[in-house]
Amino acid sequence: MEERLPAFHPTPPAGSLAGAAPRARRGQGRRVLLLLAAIAAQAALLKLTIHPRADGAFLTLPGGLFQPLLYLVLGFGLLLSTRYAAVWQSLVDSARNHRWRRMLAPQLASYALLAFCASRLLPTAFSAAPALAWPVSAWWTMLLAVSVALTCGFSLALVAPAAWWAQFARREWKTLLLACIFPLSHFIVYSLVVRSEDWLSGPTMAVVRFLLELAYDDVSMDFAAKVIGTSRFDVIIDHLCSGYEGIGMMTVFLIWYLHSFSRDFRFPPALWLFPLAALAIWLSNCLRIALLIGIGSSMSSEVAMDGFHANAGWIFFIAVALGMVALARRSAFLCRRAAPRGLVIDADNALAIPLLAMLAATLLTSAMESGFPWLYPVRMLATAAAIALLWPHLRPYLQLRFTPAALLPRLFPALAGLLVFLLWIALVPPSAAMDRAFSDSLFAAPAALSAAWIVMRIAGSSVVIPIAEELAFRGYLPLLFRGGADAFRPGGPIHWPAFAASSLLFGALHDAWLAGTLAGAAYYLVRQRSGRLSDSIVAHGTTNLLLCAYVLIDGRWSYW
């Protein structure tokens, strides 16, 4: 059984109605989510207006601490990822009788003091840092430290009572200590990359040379300059390319994975995954460099540097991570219950696979492109193939009826898609330079090829992409947060954590983050209204189809 935080259950006031409990709990959840969003907005405002990396002495300290603290928070969040539902439920229950309004004024006052102190010591978006003598600046520094502590304390007290935080700390102190490995690993990798003699450069160059000599006769290597390649294309293997970063990322990934599923593995045997993964990711980095030189020598230097170099690192990292997971799950030496070798896909996981197929195809094809996305049809065909193969699982979500009685309710999703289209045009300005570069590349090709690409782009944007993205963001993600097929009830209450996660992650998938987040929120509400995933697909498809029409009619190619 998964360990859960015990929920707080204060005695309800006399005369309360039992039927009001679910409604009150939803109100508590909305309030907690809004308070967390307000605190996050305060942090973002401070980060965007105050520039902590100032020149000179102790003023660099806030900037130096920000990144490790960010890694600590992200690591702690990842390690808690398998217990989000239990933690959230406990947090909402604790807010039942929490007198949060008492903390609102102190929290705002301490935040204002923090911002003012920071502006007295550090440059802002509006002014340079004032020149303060040592005794005065020391007082401001101490006041800044006090305001930071007060803001953090009042922010926590605003969200939940002190008793809940104390219990949370008692339960999760080991997780917090483990999360310290995330900023520590970043520091170690940074030290090895920047401040060491770069021990991995020599072995990396030796392995790359061995791989290249299997295919080329004109391999040259200058160890002092760290240059290796052929007579047609060579690269510099500096400390950033030696493999430290990949080893650090793989270590962090395995810490999260083994911690999240610790009950499934045998310890200490499972710790053998760390040296195996480090060796695998380093060898894959050597292979990546050899392939980069091979593509630049035999195909195109533009493809090598623009496409492959930018994407190959992530491709090999994902491949090695998946390989480590497969090894861990199928080894009786490492895993308590080794998984069967056959591939088993349940109905819930099938919802996420088309999007994963699309992302994988995008990553692979982008590695073979330079500039214009000529391989876009390959991405859409791969995604469509995933949908077709999983059709028995996806059919209940994708059924559309075209009778007059069934089409009338679809007018609302289509109208919502129109509103999202207008919102997108308003929030995302076109780029004349990108319009011109896109059209020059597209119409420089033969007319038949350009026309075929445009047809595939329209079909992918208005049909394939809406299906894949809605299955994942409005189908799979809400199930993770709510569980079971009853995640959506027509006209039912909004589950705010699922709503926030679905909208924010959908926005993160798009370059225009704000517009994407608002669009994801609109599509979520469309599905919430009827309970049908097909309605959000219709809304999403309508938006993309109107964007396609706008692109073709007005020549705004930058929207593609």
Image (tube, rainbow, N blue to C red):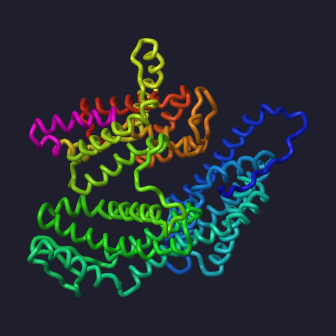
Question: Does the magenta portion include 269?
Answer: no
- Across and down, in percent, residue 235 comes to 21, 74
Question: Where residue 464 sits in the image (x, y, percent)?
Answer: 33, 36
Q: Nearer the viewer, residue 341 or 462?
A: 341
Q: Residue lying furthest right in this view?
A: 14
Q: Residue at x 46, y 37 (%)?
A: 519
Vertically, is 161 above or below 444? below
Residue at screen point 31% across, 73% down? 283
Q: Which residues are magenta?
A: 440-464
Q: Can residue 109 be seen?
A: no
Left or right of 455 on screen, residue 108: right
Tell me the quadrant of the picture where the N terminus can be found: bottom right
Establish if 75 lies above or below 399.
below
Residue 321's x, y, as percent?
Answer: 41, 63
For residue 421, say whether it is visible: yes
Q: Would you say the magenta stretch is mainly helix, strand or loop?
A: helix
